[in-house]
Amino acid sequence: MKNNTAKIAVILGPIIKEGGVTTFIEELSNILIERGYCIRIITFTKYQKASQLILNSISPNVQVFFLPKNIYDLIAFLKKRDLNLDITVSNLYYSFLLPFFISKNQIHILHGFGNLEASLLQFIIGNLSNIIGYKFAKKIIANSYLTSSVNRILGVKHSEVTPWGIPSNFNPSIIKSFDQREIDLLYVGRICLTKGLKLILKALSNILNNSGKKINFHVVGALKENLQSHQELKQASLDNIIYHGYLDKEKIVEIYSCSKLFISLNPEEPFGFTYVEALACGTPIIIPKSCGIAPFVDSRLALFVDMNERSVAEAIEYGLSKFWNLDEIARLSRDTFCWQKVANVIFGE
């Protein structure tokens, strides 16, 4: 007799409106729905701050439990007699909940690693949660070799590595000609000094002083750190910097597609969705040699820099003069950063 019991997947993690972990959960949910799973998302994110993409899901197979508000609904769900969880996926400190969601396949996702520059408490919680995930999960998956290797030093001895895929709403640009793109250089992300923004501005000043070239630089992102960081960036003596502030995804896709080069310079970036978003739109990227995405791209897609003013300035000038095959960039990136490949690692296929 055929078993018609629905397959159930539980995802533990934050679903705030913006962020790499939210994007991962959105895309993982799509994969699980395609494979016939009913999804239960357990989160401490408040409803008002949650991802609209998840809240507005057209699939009746997705249910979100907002804790602590929906705690009694969650208890009722877990007490069902015929409940059998097929897969549980934990993210970040939600690994603390793994022991309460016993399933056939328990997975913990390594999105990054603890950093003492943030705060001692965040460092301790971040690394402790990954160690707990390592203890209780049957499989650990990291988004880059950098994430895997740093966590290995910190106690997570083994993890499988697969780069995340391109977010589903980022399509190849209709602007196929490099010369027709109006924006020389683009940054998208948090407005903070750890992303190398001061170094980028110094490199642009260097180019202006040495060759007289004015390179227009567009900065997209909401201010997430202290105001001093923003003021330091504003003090740069350049009149060709355009600050856009926060933009929705549709507008960001449009800006990627109008940009010749994308740049973000955090040498300890575990992965970086903005890199693959840019590549999906056919926009080549300038990245630190040591960042997490570096092993997955080559000179057809990226320029690699040392973290100094001269190296960054040379890469910007070279990138603007080089011939780039934008169609090839979009095609290669979609082959490399593919959610079906991520699914194959998750499901062991």
Image: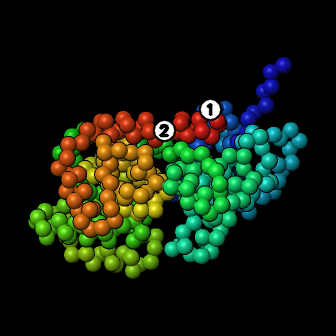
Q: Residue at x 60, y 71 (%)?
A: 122
Q: Is residue 301 above or below residue 287?
A: above
Which element is circle 1 on?
Answer: loop
* Residue type pointed to by label 2: Cys
Q: Residue at x 37, y 56 (%)?
A: 289
Q: Which residue in the structure is indicated by mark 2?
A: 338
Q: Residue 170 location, x and y as percent?
A: 41, 43
Give the Cα separation between the discs numbered 1 and 2. Answer: 14 Å
The residue closer to the viewer here, 133 or 183, is 133
* Residue type pointed to by label 1: Glu
Quadrant the C terminus occupies: top right
When asked about the image quadrant of residue 44, the answer is bottom right
For the image, the number of numbered tags is 2
In this rendering, does residue 335 appear at all? yes
Quadrant the N terminus occupies: top right
Residue furthest to the bottom: 228
Q: Residue 255 location, x and y as percent?
A: 31, 51
Q: Which residue in the structure is indicated by mark 1?
A: 349
Relative to 326, 110 lies left or right:
right
Foreground mark, 1 or 2, reads 1
Q: Residue 54 location, x and y as percent?
A: 58, 48
Using a 10 Å C-alpha cutoff, classify the residue at mark 1 as few (fewer than 14 neighbours), some (14 to 19) or many (20 or more).
few
Which element is circle 2 on?
Answer: loop
Relative to 113, 224 lies left or right:
left
Q: Residue 312 location, x and y as percent?
A: 27, 62
Q: Is residue 113 above or below residue 141?
A: below
When asked about the image quadrant of residue 342, the answer is top right
